[in-house]
Amino acid sequence: MILDTRPAAPAHVPRARPRRGPRIRGGGLASLVFLLPMLVVFTVFSWLPIGQAVVMSFQQTNLVSDATFVGLENFRTVLSDPLLWTAVENTLWFAFLALLFGYPVPLVAAVLMSEVRRFRGLYGALAYLPVVVPPVVAVLLWKFFYDASPTGVFNTLLGYVGVDALPWLQDADLAMPALVLEATWAAAGGTIIIYLAALTGVAPELYEAAEIDGAGVWRKVWHVTLPRLRGVLLVTFILQIIGTAQVFLEPFLFTGGGPANSTTTILLLIYDYAFANSLGGDYGAATALSLMLAAVLAVFSAVYFRLTRGWGTS
Amino acid sequence: MSRGILAPSDWRRPSVRRTARVVHGVLLVALFCVGLGPMLWLAKAAVTPTQDTLREPLSLWPGGFDFANLATAWTRVEIDKYFVNTVVVAAGAWLVQLLVATTAGYALSVLRPKYRKVLTGVVLATLFVPGVVLLVPLYLTVVDAGMVNTFWAVWLPAGANAFNILLVQRFFDGLPREVFEAARVDGAGPYRLFWSVVLPMSRPILGVVSVFAVVAAWKDFLWPLLVLPDPDLQPLSVRLPALQQYVELDVFLAALAISTVIPVALFLVFQRLFLKGDALSGAVKG
């Protein structure tokens, strides 16, 4: 229709042609208008604060007086805080336990679930359900489960198998594993879904080829499934490390860092520096510690990807 | 039908089928206990008197029902107010994220200004900054702007989400450009193109972003705790830990149950979006 109403003069063609590419660009103004929300929000709430974090780590800042530069004083304060090393140790312990509990379980579950032929959706939904429970609710609920009395939920379960009641969160050695157990419960479903998605991407021909070579189930899992998942496994590993290094909710709500600082993590320490004192916190020390944590994570990720480059099959 | 690790010929062997059935049965029972068990327990405890829950936490059937728990939690403990606050927080955060992500994704993917590569780079770079770095300076920004104790303090920072923009941009990149060309030939300007062509074609990705946004807002704890110190404005997640100290156990558990209903219901209704979204997040991060 449009073609019909247009004067079919060839003179139009050269004028229309160059406009074809940039035609959709809609000019510079429209682009700017559409980018405006993002530019404003990112500038104010992301880019500037990131820059500010770097500046503030060299400053003494509180909400009352003007900021003054103090050089490396904040870093010195943080590094000489005896609690820091406790927090680093606890965070590493949390990360280690989280890997121990939380890394193999979703993998095994996902591999088994991928073979389910009926009601697979039900398996997925059940596995994912804990992920949609609000984390605060989950922690408060588990806190009740961990009740130290013999009639506590978990202690009742232990009683069924003849084990004595455990003090769970009240015990300096047990508190951290208890926190990790809840955190693993809350997060495993998400990892399972990621693995399941990766498993559906494994080409059936690879299994067929392995069968022709006489491979049984275990060898197919070992030589086909796991190598195909290697890329995803490498990524979930580093994501889990980065996530657990910043664990806050569980220690904050379960134990507040206790008993005897056995669950004080780095993020809890940052929170304490900045916000525990209602009169205005030591913002300089808090940002200095967050930057150090971010730097360690960045270096770790860089080394990790360097070392594992080529491990992930395409 | 696609096959998995087990070959169709394997499935025809009775021994394989029996083993698979047993393994899958055990797995289903385990998933049921671990995934659904705590939720069922919470549902039961919400309508059980405190003494019964304390004395026999694992009895399958409560000694007596106390449905008043739910009403007490809703009215006297004012869960209704915190519930509404949560909805308001989530709705605003959802709107801001959708606005920022769709407009930015459209500009970067469809309009393609010359500086788009640089801009995409600076946006994606924020994905590599751990959230903890932003905590204190973002808090001070909000304090300086006088936004403490306003919902804007939660809504606006939620918009600075590079992951959303990445998702939307990738989706828009996959839309057929011929459609845009055709719309342009029909006389649609960039605004019309956005509203009448690109957005209606983007329902799947808008669904994923929406689910992410609402769930994240519903789950968030530390940030609203910092910027909404006024209890009258706090969402459930912030208020629940504080309530624990002065509310009776059965009513408190009822409050926990009420706080869980909406996210679980959303999940059951939009299951595919949730699962797709999480799988996507793995793929994109990968």
Image (tube, rainbow, N blue to C red):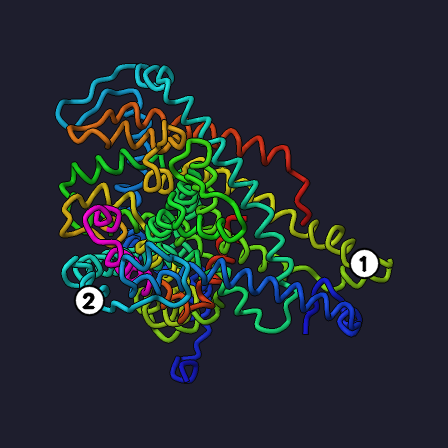
* Type of amino acid at the residue the image marks with label 1: Gly
Quick check: can you spot residue B245?
A: yes
Q: Is residue B58 above or below residue A82?
A: below
Q: Residue at 27% of width from left, 51% of height from top?
A: B237
Residue visible at 46% across and 73% down?
A10
Image mark 2: chain: B
Residue B8 screen position, x and y as percent: 76, 72
- Closer-to-camera residue (B42/A91): B42
Q: Nearer the viewer, residue B192 or B45?
A: B45
Q: Secondary structure at mark 2?
A: helix
Q: Which residue is mark 2?
A: B71
Q: Secondary structure at mark 1?
A: loop
- Quarter of the image containing the N terminus of chain A? bottom left
Residue A50 lies, in percent from the top left, at: 33, 34
Residue B235: where, in percent of width, then height?
23, 53
| Residue B243 belongs to the span the image colors magenta | yes
Instruction: Give the quadrant of residue B49.
Output: bottom left
Q: State which chain disc 1 sits on.
A: A
Question: Which secondary structure class fits the magenta region best?
Answer: helix
- Please state which of residues B270 and A2 is positioned toward the viewer in this rendering: B270
Residue B46, labelled with which disc?
Answer: none
Specify whether A216 is left or right of A152.
right
First to last magenta residue range:
B240-262
- x, y percentage for residue B245? 22, 46
Q: Which residue is mark 1?
A: A216
Q: Amino acid at mark 2?
A: Ala
Q: Is residue A89 magenta?
A: no
Measure the alpha-carbon separation of dots 2 and 1: 58 Å
Residue A250 occupies quadrant: top left
Residue ID at (23%, 20%): A60
